[in-house]
Amino acid sequence: MKRELKKDGKFSFVEIGEGTPIVILHGLMGGLSNFDGVADFFPSKGYKIVIPELPLYTMPLLKTSVGTFAKYIHEFIKARNYGKVILLGNSLGGHIALVTTKLFPEIVKGLVITGSSGLYESAMGESYPRRGDYDFIKKKAENVFYNPKVATKEIVDDVFATVNDRNKLVKTLAIAKSAIRHNMSKDLPKMHTPTCIIWGKQDNVTPPEVAEDFHKLLPDSDLFWIDKCGHAAMMEHPDEFNSLLNNWLSKRNF
């Protein structure tokens, strides 16, 4: 579903509903629409859904790093006067959410990660996209999901266009390298923000043991599994994802 993008200075974002803000961070190849299920469900539960467009391809190359994006999110939350927020991130978005929470714990009330990078080095894809090879890109996109049919032609076309745009490919590789360098294993034990970990049992990109490591290392975390599910639980099983998250938010009084 196409949603209206709002503008505030340098920030572009989707904002729906009123209440406690849930700020959603998309992944490297993921669009804002990946979170349609969350955006449709939570406003009626008393939450404001906010999805900022991350400047993945517009940030100067030397500043293209996970830490810079975390600072950008902090600036965005401050500029919008959201107060304390719940951060929700998938894949690279989860990693940015983790770094934001580490650097600016005072603005994060709760953290939700799903298929997050930050611990596992090949999370960004060990064989990098072969430009011009549509079938290879299609297989890579299908591999993200348990059910390959979730990788619609539109999703595959988007990824194909990204890796065939030289500027975007260079930025993508820079972000991937930054994510690998920015391993969180030493930081997590010092992060006391309540964290909800929702993971696909068949995630090929960040395998289940990654979720278990996050759970072990984070002092205040709850881990939930979704079966027959790959790397993007909120896309593949939106109802189950929403139900788990809604119950967790209620239990934590968020």
Image (spheres, helix red, strand yellow):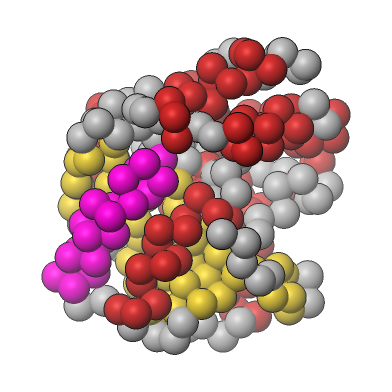
Magenta includes 153? no
Count of numbered tags: 0
Magenta includes 247? yes
70 to the left or right of 37? right
Does residue 40 show up? yes
Q: Residue at x 51, y 82 (%)?
A: 82
Which is nearer the eye, 147 or 143? Answer: 147
103 to the left or right of 170? left
Give, as a single range, the part of the protein colored magenta: 232-252
Q: Residue at x 42, y 67 (%)?
A: 40
Does residue 186 show up? no
Query: Residue 73 at x, y = what percent?
Result: 59, 64
Which is nearer the eye, 72 or 241? Answer: 241
40 to the left or right of 179? left
Query: Residue 102 at x, y = what percent?
Result: 44, 57
Q: Quadrant of residue 101?
A: bottom left
239 is higher (above) or lower (below) than 79: above
Q: Residue at x 57, y 44 (%)?
A: 30
Query: Residue 220 at x, y = what percent?
Result: 21, 56
For the C terminus, the quadrant is: bottom left
Q: Residue at x 14, y 70 (%)?
A: 251
